[in-house]
Amino acid sequence: MSEFRVRPGFPADLPVLRDVYRRASLSNSGNVAALLAHPEVLLLTDEAISEGRTRVATWTGDHIVGFATTLRAGRVRELEDLFVDPHWMRRGVGRRLVADVVAVAEREHVQRVEVTANPHALAFFENVGFVHDGEVGTRFGAGAQMHLDVAAARDAP
């Protein structure tokens, strides 16, 4: 994991981020039919990058392997997107991105990170320390509203 770096996203990253976003979204067979029925959701806009809300994970140099997008709302930072290149899944990229989101939140004195997890990502978020707050409806069905306390994440082994 020591070779993963996380940095701010830049406008020049957008073509690669769009590719990662689309391929990662379609990598779970349980999501494919719904996503292809609504192709507009497979288009990543430049809004989060231009607003400085995207963090990019790279491997040895600047090979982009994933990204996370957050939105600050008072004492909370919402994790809007977390996508990992399918070839890099299960190698610690997502965990590294969550650790970076927590580090940024801590520097900003944000108390917690929240996420709405789809059923396919639920185990990942549980494994990195998020806890359930309840179920919420999303455009594509039920999701789990979850949170991670920044102080608890910092103190975890």
Image (cartoon, rainbow, N blue to C red):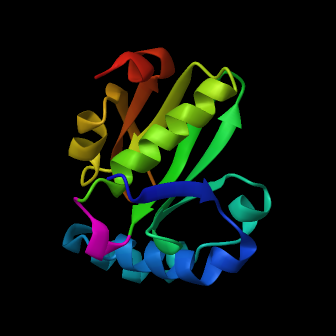
Rendered position, 74 above or below 86: above
The residue lying toward the viewer, choosing from 150 and 138, is 150
- Asked whether residue 134 is in view, the answer is yes
Q: Position of residue 68 (x, y in %)?
A: 52, 54
Q: Position of residue 59 (x, y in %)?
A: 42, 67
**Image quadrant assignment for residue 60:** bottom left
Quadrant holding the C terminus:
top left
Residue plotted at (69% across, 36% down): 72
- Asked whether residue 38 is in view, the answer is no
* Residue 101 painted magenta: no
Q: Position of residue 98 (x, y in %)?
A: 44, 42
The residue lying toward the viewer, choosing from 156 and 116, is 156
Rendered position, 108 above or below 43: above
**Image quadrant assignment for residue 137:** top left
The residue lying toward the viewer, choosing from 93 and 79, is 93
Q: Residue furthest right?
A: 50
Which stretch appears magenta? 85-90
Rendered position, 51 above or below 87: above
Q: Is residue 34 left or right of residue 55?
A: left
Residue plotted at (27% across, 76% down): 87
